[in-house]
Image: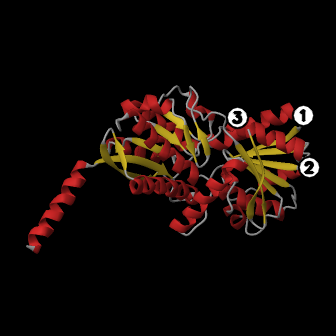
Amino acid sequence: MKKTLVAAALLSASSLALAQEVVKIGHSAAVTGPVAYFGKDTENGARMAIEALNARGVSIKGKKVRFELVAEDDGGDPKQATSVAQKLVDARVNGVVGHETSGTTIPASKIYHQAGIPQISPSSTSPKYTQQGFNTAFRVVANDIQLGRALGHYAVKDMGAKRVAVIDDRTAYGQGLATEFGKSLQQQGAQVVAREFTHDKATDFNAILTKIRATKPDLVFFGGMSAVAGPMLRQMKQLGLNVRMMGGDGICSDEIHKLSGGAMLDNQVFCAEAGGVDAAGRAGLDRFRADYKKRFGIDVQINAPYAYDAVMTMAEAMSKAGSTAPAQYLPVLAKIQYKGVTGPIAFDARGDIRDGTITLYTFKGGRRTVLAVTK
């Protein structure tokens, strides 16, 4: 009798599993290499959303579905990103959250577009991503035009910067942000006294910093990631270039203090996150951060909540469309209005988030401190 009951239970469980459709959400970012902490952050955020959806139980057009995260490592490399994108297409994912950087997101987006698979980036800010004319490309953060404008305005109006040296790492993200920042500076009446370049794996900046020191800047702007900015801060101190640094969300992580070897001073580094919530949304975001720490034992770096919202927005579009098929839910996604933990999510005709916010930070005691939330 017991054997019969066990067999019946197993058969029932098996039938239930077969009845459930598996919805595959691809995620790609650098989870190895110098910026792995950013990539793992977005992967964790996406995973939290998948777990929340499955715990809630989702039915689409009356049929139970189970979400599954298909996570891949693009190493932060554009060539690897295209290989990963093809791998996700071949795995027949229903949608993609990623990639992490603009340099990987842009080449991968062509592959997703050709396959008709919706892609939402939780962190890529280059305007080029959504200027390609791909109806499959979306992002849930503000772009570099908005970031550069906000940073330039704050540098001049609030920090009193007049002579600024600009460095970028030659990536799509770093170069694009530095260009937009430079435009904003000129509009504010400040002077770019030096324009220098490095690369995203550089460790020695003595030559360019020595040239910059001779121009006597009162601010150094860096378009790139904290893995480069941290060592740069250490060498700035060694050369007696004791000025403030500013950058975008690529340097907006507490990791920068560790990477600087303790050289970073309080209120020396200023950065902007391509997103953020006003006072009304802070409680919800704080809850997410607490849940994240409980789940993974570490703090949110920066983009985990945007990856979470990207998955949730995609799932909402599927529910509203009554289908998990990319071709069916894509038009609904383009017109979606979703209230996420990072605020309201809706896309313009290009796939950029509407009314994207910018959060400005400085660092005290090696920790990010909010200065302002703006648009």
The colour scheme used here is secondary structure
Snapshot quadrant of residue 261: bottom right
Sequence-wise first label, 2 or 1? 1
Residue at x-position 83% and y-position 45%: 165
Q: Nearer the viewer, mark 3 or mark 2?
A: 3
Quarter holding the N terminus?
bottom left
Query: Relative to 83, is 1 on the left or the right?
Result: left
Label 1 neighbour load within 10 Å: few <14, some 14-19, many 20+: few
Residue at x-position 51% and y-position 29%: 335
Q: On the image, numbered disc 2 is attached to which residue?
A: 216
Helix, strand or loop at disc 1?
loop
* Three-letter amino acid code at the position of disc 3: Ile
Q: Label 2 vs label 1: CA separation?
A: 17 Å
Residue sticking out furthest to the bottom: 2
Give the camera-side residue of 30 and 279.
279
Quarter holding the C terminus?
top right
Residue 300 in sight: no
Give the camera-side residue of 333 and 115.
333
Label 3 neighbour load within 10 Å: few <14, some 14-19, many 20+: some
* Three-letter amino acid code at the position of disc 2: Lys
Query: Relative to 355, is 219 on the left or the right?
Result: right
Labelled disc at residue 189 = 1
Sequence-wise first label, 3 or 1? 3
Q: Nearer the viewer, mark 3 or mark 1?
A: 3
Labelled disc at residue 145 = 3
Q: Label 3 vs label 1: CA separation?
A: 18 Å
Q: Label 3 vs label 2: CA separation?
A: 27 Å
Label 2 neighbour load within 10 Å: few <14, some 14-19, many 20+: some
